[in-house]
Amino acid sequence: MKRNLMFILFTLVVVLLIGFAFAGCKKEAKEIVIGGVGPVSGEAATFGQSTKEGCELAVEEWNAAGGLLGKTIKLIYQDDKGDPTEAATVWTKLITQDKVAAIVGTAMSKCSLAGAPISQQYKVPMISPTSTNPKVTEVGDYIFRACFIDPFQGTIGAKFAYENLNARKAACIFDVGNDYTKGLSEFFRDKFTELGGTIVAFEAHPTGTTDFKAQLTKIIAAKPDVIYISDYYNDVALIAKQARELGFNGPLVGGDGWDSPDLVKIGGTAVENGYFTNHFSKDDPRPIVQEFVKKYQAKFGKVPDAFAALAYDAMYIMLDAIKRAGSTDPEKIKKALAETNINVVSGLVTFDKNRNPIKSAVIIAIKNGQQVYQATVNP
Amino acid sequence: MKLNNNSIFSKILYFFKRRIVLFLIASIIVMLIIMLLHTFDILNSYIIQIINVSLVYVILAVSLNLINGFTGQFSIGHMGFAAVGAYTSATITTLLLKITPTSLPNYIIFILALLAGGCLAGLTGFIIGFPSLRLKGDYLAIMTLGFGEIIRTIFNNINFVGGPRGLLGIPKFSTFPIIFITSILTIIIIRNLVFSTHGRALLSIRENEVASELVGVDTTKYKILAFVIGAFFAGIGGGLLAHLIQIAHPTQFGFMYSILVLIMVYAGGMGSISGSVIAAFVLTFLSEGLRVALASLSDLLKFPVGDQWRMVIYSLLLIFIMLFRTEGLMGMKELKFLIPEEEDIHGKCS
Amino acid sequence: MDISTILQQIFNGLQLGSIYALIALGYTMVYGIVRLINFAHGDFYMIGAYASYGLFFAIGTLVASSFSGPTAAIVLFLIILIGSMISGGAIALLANQFAYKPLRNKPRLSSLITAIGVSMFLEYFLSALPVVGPSYRGFPELIKKATYNFGPAIVSNYVLLDLGVAAVLMIFLTVLVKYTKIGKAMRAVSQDKDAAKLMGINIESVIATTFLIGGSFAGVAGLLAGLTYPRIYPYMGILPGLKAFIAAVLGGIGNIPGAMLGSYIMGIVETFATAMNSLIGEGIAFAILIIVLLFRPQGLLGEKVADKI
């Protein structure tokens, strides 16, 4: 019995090893393989799920429109669990085994940072949909991104709070273990003080917590005019609820992490009087936006969030670059990517010399449970 | 005269017949074969990467086994030590490369940085080992968990090492031969320790602490010793990991990763070095192999079975392993390679 | 910090402590009797929350149409309460039957690994299952939220509800373990399994009962946590489960009033540590725990057990 089991386990490993060795061999010439990466399991799974759906939708549209360079596009979407070690392994797999032409991924900056050096080493262009850490694209000239970087949104948020909401005292709350939310809050703080306002409280909370009352009690005791919440929608909803419960009625401001239909579903009336910076507004009459929202709803039965929209854009930008390059030669794709000038869901995208997108931001208000377009801010 | 000659010759022969030497030679042959296969691309970089990750986990699991399996302590904050090692060595290499470009060969810088990381981790182990003198079992577990989380909080708040952004731009010094040789050295050192007089003392603490104290074992000294050595190798493992994936991030050393190493120790069999090695390989290959398996399943069923099912199957298989091999894959046994010849005479031990 | 902030923080800490207590009570009871660190306990809690959520959408409108006014809310709450208990208890029984029972007489740490396996399975399975999925869901407001002014501090009715339920469950457990026949059997099993068997106690059924009760407590905790912090997702059990485990150990693991005490201390320490410096709040909280444990190595209310030789 014992020996049998050991034997079975060892054969399993051996079979897998052989499987690995041969899996790389089959490759059809009729396909262009694109790698996708995102955390579809683990605590960030819901972000990875949206990213995956955005990528799938874009690939489906392109395939329906006749594919790419006369070939069909095959998307191989891999899970990184939100773990840098797995991300590094996945990148190696996609490049050396699946022989992808390009990679779209991944959601978390820390994972993109583990993947980027591998992309750079093997010269496989990658575009990250939602990694906001400025360092990601600094790894090398094959690395691009589709989202804003931290300083941009924090600065716009501070300007909006100071000029449009007439706030003079602001408080920040962010996730201590997440560089995106910490970065946004830090840039908000810097800009807000530069404009002449004061930051009365700058509070952090641990990742995954549900109770923010200790921080909020301290914040509210400092009497801010506005609270800047740089978290993702799931935390924002809880923070808003608890802030309202503790008696704060002023406006709440945040970043694109807010953009999800679940924000209002979880937060209810607490997120009213909330404003956030985003890539696009669902009210935007441009056909590509309306088409995207409609198709996404038809396919997945829900309103797209920021992760889905950015993944869709990232995939679109990448496929467009391959099309313009006219081949899957990485050098040409890289060059085409740098010359990108395309109208996607989040507006007209071009890249600066650090391969970060230059695109305008919109400010969205939450009124009666609806996202209402407020203003467009150009970079 | 004749006798003398003969004895030198027989000594050499005896040396090469010793199992541990055979083990070393066999490992080096395996390493060369893998490298050869990689050169001809029969084993692609993906598999080499998985082997690398497995080997890092081998170091972490074997070192935790020294604390938990052989000494019978219950530490669940092992990744805290790895964090100290990773951050220390990565800071040294990134800084040195910035200041003095290649006055020393890279691998010497790397080895020194790894050792520094290991030593600092060992120092942390020394500090954390102290509570173990007062606390037992689950109370000790909470203590180590708490220390692990404190270490993580500290790194999360030092902006010099990147805070929640992580420490970036670490050079890729962890190549397959370096990781391989380090893990083999770890195995041999811990094996030699366990089968020495000191190892006997550790085992006696596991079996019965009070009784071992009564027969004159300095339990205080040995418990601290286990923590220091375990932490030292965890620090080395952490350093290798950081230089393998080129980023050190506080979340990589969180509680869930300590639990993963703990699983490897117990699923391999506590108090079995070979068990930890096998479990580290089986579990790492399993989690990657399921990707390929699910992809072929999707092709077969013409229905997309996403990667999210990977961990579902993984956790089920973990439960099954424990149900069928209740004492872990190897139980308390050791592969013969790792048992010194002297043990055969004394009968089975450990 | 002025006095009103301090008072408010005390209430915040009490609420957090109540949620920990609800989970820690089940945790410590199972530990006390089976000596198993049931890592999956936090996931039973998650199952309880999801069951309540599902039940609300399944029968919510039906109940609202059959009863009128406030009765509807009360009936609905009671049905969901029972539903959450049943689901938590059932999942605990299943886990016991398939993952823990076969390892009963094996090394204690083998079942620790299966417990981790069960925990991972429940999380990843629900997350992968298309009907549940990994997304965050808003928990319905079953009881209308009201806030009271308690001096300068603001307290919601949920805080009082959590406190009340935690207290009731603790008293229930203490009475059950101390004064009932099954409680006697539980204590016998925890002291000496073989002797208990010789006395004619059916060990397996006692253990199953323990899991049933522990699991149903976790289910209730899931419901209340869903109400208090209205956001549920498949990984919601990890952090509270860990914190409850720490609280149970702090109070002296296996000790029921100890778990309660440990939870409230954890809640208040965490709240004040966060208020002091939120960047390293968790670190401070852990440091305090370590100091407490150094002075009371057997936990706050735990008894010192002499080693057997």
Image (tube, helix red, strand yellow):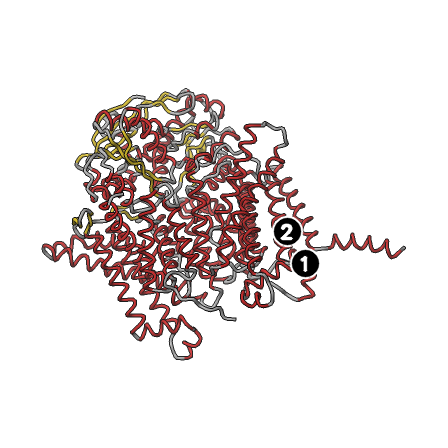
Q: Nearer the viewer, residue C93 or A134?
A: A134
Q: In the displayed structure, would residue C16 be above or below residue B217? A: above
On the image, the x and y values in percent for residue A218 come to 27, 41
Please state if C10 lies on the left or on the right of A38 as rendered: left
On the image, the x and y values in percent for residue A350 come to 37, 21
Q: Residue B67, located in which quarter of the rendered image? A: bottom right
Question: Subunit of mark 1?
Answer: B
Q: Give the label on residue A271, or none.
A: none
Question: Subunit of mark 2?
Answer: B
Q: Which residue is mark 1?
A: B340
- How far is mark 2 from mark 1, CA to CA? 11 Å
- Residue type of the residue flagged with mark 2: Ile
- Dot 1 lies on which element? loop
Q: Quadrant of the N terminus of chain B?
A: bottom right
- Dot 2 lies on which element? helix
Q: Residue C204, located in which quarter of the rendered image? A: bottom left
Q: In the displayed structure, would residue A224 be above or below residue C205? A: above
Q: In the displayed structure, would residue A322 be above or below residue C35? A: above
- Residue type of the residue flagged with mark 1: Pro
Residue C284 visible? The answer is yes
Of callouts 2 and 1, which one flags the residue occurring earlier in the amino acid sequence? Answer: 2
Q: Which residue is mark 2?
A: B188
On the image, the x and y values in percent for residue B184 come to 62, 48
Please state if C247 lies on the left or on the right of B33 as rendered: left
Q: Nearer the viewer, residue A48 or B210?
A: B210
Graded by Cα atoms within 10 Å as few (under 14), some (14 to 19) or many (20 or more), the crowding at tag 1 reads: some
